[in-house]
Image (cartoon, grey):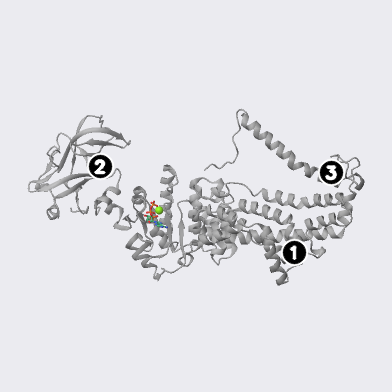
Amino acid sequence: MSRSATAPVPRSIRPGAIIAWTCLFVGGVIMITPLLFMFSTSLKSAGEVFDLRLVPANPTLQNYVRVLSDGRFLGWFLNSTLIAVITTVSCLFFDSLVAYTLAKFRFPGRKLVFLAILSTLMIPTEMLVIPWYLMSSSLGWTDTYWGIMFPGLMTAFGVFLMRQFFETVPDDFLEAARIDGLNEFTIWWRIAMPLVTPALSALAIFTFLGNWTAFFWPLIVTTDRDLYTLPVGLSSFAVEQSIQWEMIMTGAALSTIPTLLIFLFFQRYIVRGVMLAGVKG
Amino acid sequence: MASITLDKIVKTYGASTAVHGIDLQIADGEFVVLVGPSGCGKSTTLRMIAGLESISGGTLKIGARVVNQMEPKQRNIAMVFQNYAIYPHMTVHQNIGFGLYTSKLSRAEKDARVQEVGRILGLSHLLERRPAALSGGQRQRVAIGRAMVRDPQAFLFDEPLSNLDAQLRGQMRLEIKQLHQRLGSTIVFVTHDQVEAMSMADRIVVMREGRILQVGAPMELYNRPADMFTARFIGSPEMNMLDAELSGDGLGFGANAGRVALVPDALPPGLRQASSPRVAVGIRPQDLAPLNAGTTGAALVLHGTVRVAEPHGSETFVHLDLPSGSVIARAPAAASYRPGDAASFKADRDSIRYFDRETEKLVA
Ligand SMILES: Nc1ncnc2c1ncn2[C@@H]1O[C@H](COP(=O)(O)OP(=O)(O)OP(=O)(O)O)[C@@H](O)[C@H]1O
Ligand SMILES: [Mg+2]
């Protein structure tokens, strides 16, 4: 297996490549335009919002000052951070624990369990929201952090992703550790987990993003404004009084910061071929 | 250090049996090599000793303890894997130190042990490196270090050298043997390379299809292989086997075999007891010498045509086509043989082995 992940440099540019690059460029522009407008609007004053120029005529940081000094925004921001961090840590831990067991232990019903977990991927969230809600209200979980978090503490997707990666961990490592006297849990934690850091990083990014931007379920399960997550809170800017676009856009701009940080932090670990060094392939 | 005793050890996978009740006593401090062709159950046997594979039947003892039901860590053995299996996310120091994971030594004592092992294996200057920055031989040395650091009851090696190139393999072979002499540890070493087996073992265990064919010191196996399989397996190039028919006039090499025959006088007395007249005559290439003009008293002379000659520097191996079959013979390096030449080789009476072709067992 090749240790390098770099693509070969093309000698000449083929027509296919031109088409591909064009498509990617157009796609990139489409993706980035709303973001640019978000930032540009966040720098405009209220009167200027519907002046659709990309570069504001009188850029101002006033919106940022207002949003940041608004206690509600900071509260929502912290709620979102707390929920996204806890669900991410929980998913990394429990998804990989289940995935490792499914990938590396032989027990009756193992395939069945995996299929059962996978099959939950086929059910859309919208269908689950009502049972979740009924469950939460009968257990008194509405308007609690736990109520917002519990559906996301483990994900079938994470189990699936991590299982695929654990399957690629050579058994020799685990057996060597067994002989060195580690117990099964420690083998998972000290040996197997470090070997799948690229997958863990990817899962961390996905899970964090998913929970940071989650809107539908937090909206349903919370009525207490203090428990709102950032997306729910920002959308409440839209319904009260008149819609304050510049405020919404400022909040949204601020809400991208953690996602950027998470991405920058974890993408370093998405390095291929870490595992190849310890065994001869 | 401890002895290892296998008593009728069986391994079954569902309906198929990988190891058919093998008996083996490995003495304390002995270097035992399991050899055999691929799939003969060497790894399975080793892994049962290690505790990585459950034992389907029989009793396994390490020292005086029956360990059938024990976890690998309770058995206190160390194992070196074919693929090294050193942890890529740890430095050499951490990898070696991992062998002491369960040890109750203090941090400083552990560190001293790691340094000591690193020094013995010539890894001192590499202790802070990660496996990715090591050569194959260095990685294998780290794996051995992780095994050594703990002072285990026994070392188990599963084809540890097969990923190394020929030169490095020779060097590591020597190092492992020296390590054994120095530590006096019990070693069970699996390989399918008979050269490794011959050069390192105190005793060799030849396995085939889940059974032990023969156990003995290297020279014992070389000189008196118990059957045709072992005879061919041990020694390089492999032993020549010629089909022959036993009759009242002696031993005939087939109707069209140029009427080469061995007269009864030249035959060992044991051969008379062979259950069937169909025998295989085994002669090592090293025991076939060129027939010189003045030679007398050779038990067997083979006349043939040279197919190819392979000079090895110190000697030349001549592939000789006989009227029936072919043989390899050793000639002095100086001798020159060209394809198509007629050549004659002789073997002494004592160097010839006779096997029963039905049972493949040694007859005489
Ligand atoms: N998990 C398993 N399930 C079923 N059969 C197995 C299993 N592991 C090994 N076997 C069988 O047991 C037999 C012995 O295998 P083993 O790995 O011990 O061979 P080996 O002597 O080490 O060969 P090699 O030199 O190729 O490593 C083989 O026929 C193999 O197919
Ligand atoms: Mg094997």
At mark 3, the secondary structure is helix
Give coordinates of residue A255: x percent, y percent.
78, 52
Give coordinates of residue A249: x percent, y percent.
83, 49
Q: Chain of mark 1?
A: A
- B66 and B26: which one is in front? B66
User: Which disc, if any, is residue B285?
Assistant: 2
* Residue that lies at the very extreme toward the top in this rendered image: A12
- A279 and A77: which one is in front? A77
Amino acid under disc 3? Ser
* Residue that lies at the very extreme toward the left in this rendered image: B248
Q: Can the viewer see residue A38?
A: yes
User: Which disc, if any, is residue A40?
Assistant: 3
Q: CA distance from mark 3 to mark 2?
A: 88 Å
Image depth: mark 3 or mark 2 in front: 3
First-in-chain label (1 vs 3):
3
Vertical arrangement, residue B170 with respect to residue A76, above or below: above
Q: CA distance from mark 1 to mark 2?
A: 86 Å
Give coordinates of residue B114: x percent, y percent.
54, 57
Image depth: mark 1 or mark 3 in front: 1
A169 sits to left or right of B38: right
* Residue that lies at the very extreme toward the bottom in this rendered image: A139
A239 sits to left or right of B52: right
Give coordinates of residue B314: x percent, y percent.
31, 37
- The residue labelled by disc 1 is A221
Amino acid under disc 1? Val
Quarter of the figure that contains the N terminus of chain B: bottom left
